[in-house]
Amino acid sequence: MYIIDLGKLLPEFPKNMKIKKYLISGCQSQTWIALTNSVMPYNDLITLHGYSDSSIVKGIITIIFSLYQGLNLQEAVNVDIKPFLINQLQLKQNLTISRSQGIYLILNSIHSQAYSLYKL
């Protein structure tokens, strides 16, 4: 399956989350990433929501989200998926510099949002 095809699997992004707080500043395309978590006792699994006006970025978001699937807040804060994306999937070699930078911005946003919720 190609990256663009993976983007078609991305669930619809909630319209109420399409706000500046979740906009990825510096990304080549208009991209929003929002992280929420369950507040049930013993279950603080994260849920990621994402949207981009770029088909390839939607596919990249789908890949990134699959790597965070099933993680709780602490795990999301501590995990570093950059080496996997760069080395194993070789995304850096197959993307422009600006798209690669966008990946880092998306990952930084996810980490920052997870950290903010974890420290509450």
Image (tube, rainbow, N blue to C red):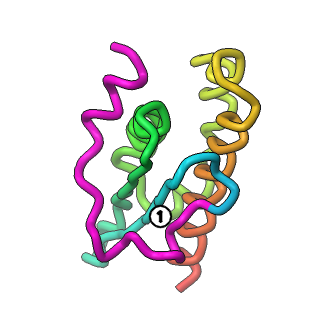
Q: Is residue 99 magenta?
A: no
**Which residue is pictured at 53% across the width and 65% down the height?**
23
The three-letter code of the residue at mark 1 reads: Leu
Label 1 neighbourhood size at 10 Å, few (<14), some (14-19), many (20+)?
A: many
Q: Establish if 85 lies above or below 12.
A: above
**Front residue of this view, candidates 8 and 107:** 8
How many labels, in total?
A: 1
Task: Indicate the position of residue 54 as horizontal and vertical percent values.
Answer: 46, 40
Q: Could you tell me which quadrant the N terminus lies in?
A: top left
Could you say whether the residue bearing mark 1 is in a helix, strand or loop?
Answer: helix
Residue located farthest toward the bottom when viewing the structure as drawn: 120
Task: Indicate the position of residue 89 as horizontal and vertical percent values.
Answer: 57, 18
Q: Establish if 47 lies above or below 3.
A: below
- Quarter of the image where one finds residue 35: bottom left
**Which residue is pictured at 69% across the width and 34% down the height?**
100
Q: Establish if 56 lies above or below 43.
A: above
**Which residue is pictured at 72% across the width and 41% down the height?**
101
- Quarter of the image where one finds residue 49: bottom left
Task: Indicate the position of residue 85 as horizontal and vertical percent values.
Answer: 60, 28
Residue identified by numbered label 1: 73
Residue located farthest toward the right when viewing the structure as drawn: 97
**Front residue of this view, candidates 74 and 99:** 99
Q: Which residues are magenta?
A: 1-24
**Which residue is pictured at 58% across the width and 80% down the height?**
119
Q: Is residue 11 left or right of residue 117?
A: left
